[in-house]
Image: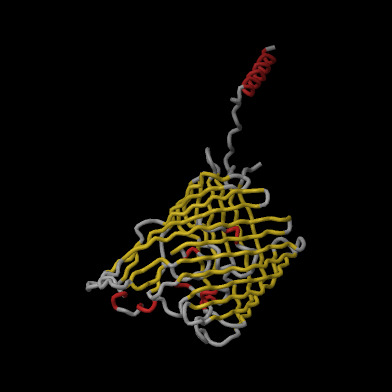
Amino acid sequence: MLAAAVLALGIGAEHVAAQDGRAKRPEKKDGDTSTVIEVYGFAQGDFIFDFRSNNPDWFDVNRPTKIPAFVDEFGGNGRTWFSIRQSRFGTKATIPTSTKPIYITWEWDLFGVGIDAGQTTIRPRLMYGQWGPWGAGQLWSPFMDNDVFPNILDYWGPNGMMFFRNVQVFWQPIKRDDGTRATIALERPGASGDAGRVADRVELQNIIARFPLPDVSAEYRRGFKWGYLELAGIYRYISWNDVLLDPFDLGGHDHGWGVSLSSNVKPGRNDVIRFQVVYGEGVENYFNDAPVDIGVKLNPGNLITPVVGEALGDFGGVLYLDHNWSKTLSSAIGYSRVEIDNSNLQLPTAFKAGNYASTNLLWAPVPAILIGGEFQWGWRQNFQDDFVANDYRVQFAMKYNFSQKFGGKKQ
């Protein structure tokens, strides 16, 4: 009877605890983990025939700013290129906490830029973490819309879209399952300048750029059943100091700003229309392919500051259609453009406008493999000398993806 009473008491206590929600959870066993690590990436070989020519530091991409600015700038027409620089490796971690999970991404590719332009070398793409609405590191600027990038083989892609990964700290107070989100960020500042016709003047050899404030960017995306609509903007303060002791004062500052409207529209289950339009001043380095942010113009009547810098006006646009012919065949076709409002002291050969277009046929015989061919067209127009140049390229690629997750709760 004593045993029966103890058993009954135990059952009763368990029932009461369950009723008031205070039942204890099983203790976590040693060796169990809820952290999930994903390792992913792909190996890709690109094989390109260029019917014309472009800057050999950018041999495996089609960038209108890198098309010749004068006859035979990069030699004769007709080049064959092989590349593996698109190949990528990355890791992601999801770490649960007592509140919101922590998300971490660490990703590289082999595409050298800056002082490594033209090289096959390890380059950081994404290095950031996020906990709840707060995040920091290197990732896509809120001023860009990564979902505008079409399903193409060319690594660089449409020139007129915003595409810039930047070091930043961001706050994302809205993020919903339907795709609606809002983000505000403070980004690493930076800009480039073109002294144009007066670049060789001694007085301009001692101009030092200075960025006292971070770039401030923001986006708001509203999700719909048919896709989404996104509005983004950016503001930046750009200054430069004249450190040469002479009668001239060539220091100054200007303001950069930009607004962007972008969207993905899904008219049917086999199609996605991607578009973006951008207008601003002094935000060229946020474009996927555009020239300098600051130009030089005359300042008549001022003997102390005969020339001044100004943020160059910029416009960009992109429109692409991604279409699935079947479960294994797809195509993308579209057009993009960049226009610059040049300053009056830029050289006649300075970049004025560029066009980009492409179409392809891609085959995915199994989910981890992609094989395809693509035709690309690039076009460049100079500022004042009426020179224009075209570039026609054919690119073939073979891509092999991998992804594996580790960790998670053990059974």
**In the orientation shown, which residue stands out farthest toward the right?**
326
In the picture, the quarter occupied by the N terminus is top right
Q: Can residue 53 be spotted in the picture?
A: yes
Residue 230 vs residue 35, the one in the foreground: 230
Query: Seen in the image, is 240 located left or right of residue 167?
Result: left
Q: Is residue 385 above or below residue 18?
A: below
Q: Residue at x 39, y 60 (%)?
A: 255
Q: Residue at x 61, y 70 (%)?
A: 154
Residue 39, position as x, y percentages in the image? 60, 57
Residue 335 falls in which quadrant of the image? bottom right
Residue 133, position as x, y percentages in the image? 51, 45
In the picture, the quarter occupied by the C terminus is top right
Q: Can residue 156 be spotted in the picture?
A: no
Q: Is residue 363 above or below residue 228?
A: below
**In the orientation shown, which residue stands out farthest toward the front?**
301
Residue 244, position as x, y percentages in the image? 25, 72
Q: Is residue 133 above or below residue 70?
A: above
